[in-house]
Amino acid sequence: MHFVPFDGGVLEYGTPAGAFLSGPLMEASLKMRCDTSGAGYSIYWKEVDGQLTIAGSYVTPERAAALKASGKEMSFAEASADVTLDAKGIGPVATVIKTREPVFVKEVATSTMKRKELALEYGVRSVCFVPVEGGVMEYGVSAGAETADWATMSDARTAIMPKAEMKKAFENGATHLIFWKPEGDKYVAGASFVLPERLRALKAARGDDKSYTSESLSFELDVAGEGPVATAARSGKEIVVADAKNEPTYKRAALAEEFGVGDVHFVPCRDGVLEYGRGSGSE
């Protein structure tokens, strides 16, 4: 429970016991946070009985390759796996738990992070900590070209993934997510996620690493267009393409047919449009 004073009263808010990120929602949140921010890794810290432990993590393929090339056998996220933090402490993770406000560490080298030496060993330069359901998400960049270079918290938080909509998507049987963000007069794919079991099924059936999602990432969609992404954004309402492969006006109908994608949903959110859909079991 949190109690925050303000003029005229006190705001009380809290998180229900047992409300945590888990399963595909946690996996998608970790990956898509890296996609949108340019981070090389992300960690989900889960709070249980006053202790913070790591419940999940993600490292981008580019960062993993750079670490391997430098002789590292694991990542900073993996090296942090056994760390436990006191939720009442003064570090950035505990501070976010207590205040529910993000914390940005621009230079790890001059910080008071408990894991500072470990972070420096793995080349971590800047880290952002943000509140999420049941805990804190940590994500960071290195000095290498495989990650972004953050100067401010705004650089680290260019887009906020709509967790409630993502949760609903998986509850509705989604096998893929794509986050479309506006850039100039186009919408581009800013983040994506495909269920691991979906990727395995596709590879077994096709013999390659392609998916409806991977092939969609190169598309650019007109902000002023009549497609479902632009229409959802303009109207502020969810658009559903019920039979994508047979919809003649759907720009990616051929991809939907090739990869067995049926209905596709487009949900407007704060920083763009979240697309999700379901793939069939026979490709």
Image (tube, grey):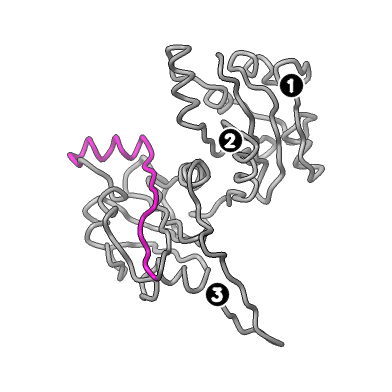
- Rendered view: 177 above or below 216: below
Asked whether residue 183 appears in the rendered view, the answer is no
Question: In the visual, does 8 lie left or right of 60?
Answer: right
The image position of residue 94, as x and y in percent, is 40, 70
- Rendered view: 280 above or below 145: above
Q: Earlier in the sequence, mark 3 or mark 2?
A: 3
Mark 3: amino acid? Met
The image position of residue 123, as x and y in percent, is 27, 51
Between residues 108 and 229, which one lies in front from this camera angle? 229
Gap in angstroms between the C-alphas marked 3 and 1: 45 Å
Element on which disc 2 rests: strand
Q: Which mark is residue 106?
A: none
Residue reaching furthest to the bottom? 8
Residue range of the region highlighted in magenta in the rendering: 50-72
Mark 2: amino acid? Leu
Q: Which residue is mark 1?
A: 243
The image position of residue 19, as x and y in percent, is 53, 58
3 and 2 marks in contact (CB < 8 Å): no
Mark 3, mark 1: which one is toward the viewer? 3
Residue reaching furthest to the left? 71
Mark 1: amino acid? Asp
Between residues 167 and 98, which one lies in front from this camera angle? 167
Q: Earlier in the sequence, mark 2 or mark 1?
A: 2
Q: Which residue is mark 2?
A: 177
